[in-house]
Image: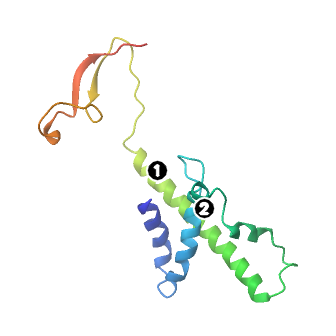
Amino acid sequence: MNRVIEDTLRCYIQRQEDWEKWLPYVEIAINNSEASSTGKSPYFSNYGFHPQFQTIRNVSDNEVRVPKAAEFINDLENILGEIKSKLRAAIDRQTSYANTRRRELSFDEGENVMLSTRNIPLQTGVRKLTDRFIGPYLNHSN
């Protein structure tokens, strides 16, 4: 998440004179973006509803009587749209980086396999110095 925030903020640092005004919008965009693992936004996960600003989109231009308020709503929608698209781009970029070393493996029955010791409690002195993989073991299908 820190990388996503960093990447999103980096998009606005180019605007040296006003980047700090974008911080609340970046926060709103991140907290209201759906997480791939849960399918829910962080805000919705914590509070069970989305923030009130979501309803700004439902306000028609005829309902806004103060020109400055209409301008603010329009600016907010534009800023949030831009931030969300940059946030999506940052997430996509990091996903592609993470997937560069991943590969789908499949093993056939009767094949010898090595087991990672990452999640196996081994009775050894120093964890750092233990073998990363143990085996080979015969693959059995259940």
Label 2 residue SS: loop
Tell me residue 132's x, y (percent). 21, 34
| Screen quadrant of the C terminus | top left
Q: Which label's residue is closer to the chain start, 1 or 2? A: 2
Residue at the farthest left position: 125
Q: What residue is shown at x 62% (from left), y 57% (from top)?
A: 44
In this view, the residue in front, 8 or 49, is: 49
Answer above or below: position of 75 versus 49.
Answer: below
Which amino acid type corresponds to the residue marked 1 in the rendered image?
A: Thr
Of the two numbered discs 1 and 2 in the rendering, the one whose residue sits closer to the viewer: 2
11 relative position to 77: left or right? left
Tell me residue 84's x, y (percent). 59, 64
Label 1 residue SS: helix
127 relative position to 120: left or right? left
Tell me residue 81's x, y (percent). 64, 68
Q: Which residue is mark 2?
A: 32
Coloring basis for residues = rainbow
Q: What residue is shown at x 46% (from left), y 61% (from top)?
A: 4
78 relative position to 37: left or right? right
Task: Quote the CA–CA distance across marks 1 and 2.
Answer: 19 Å
In this view, the residue in front, 112 or 29, is: 29
Q: Which residue is mark 1?
A: 95
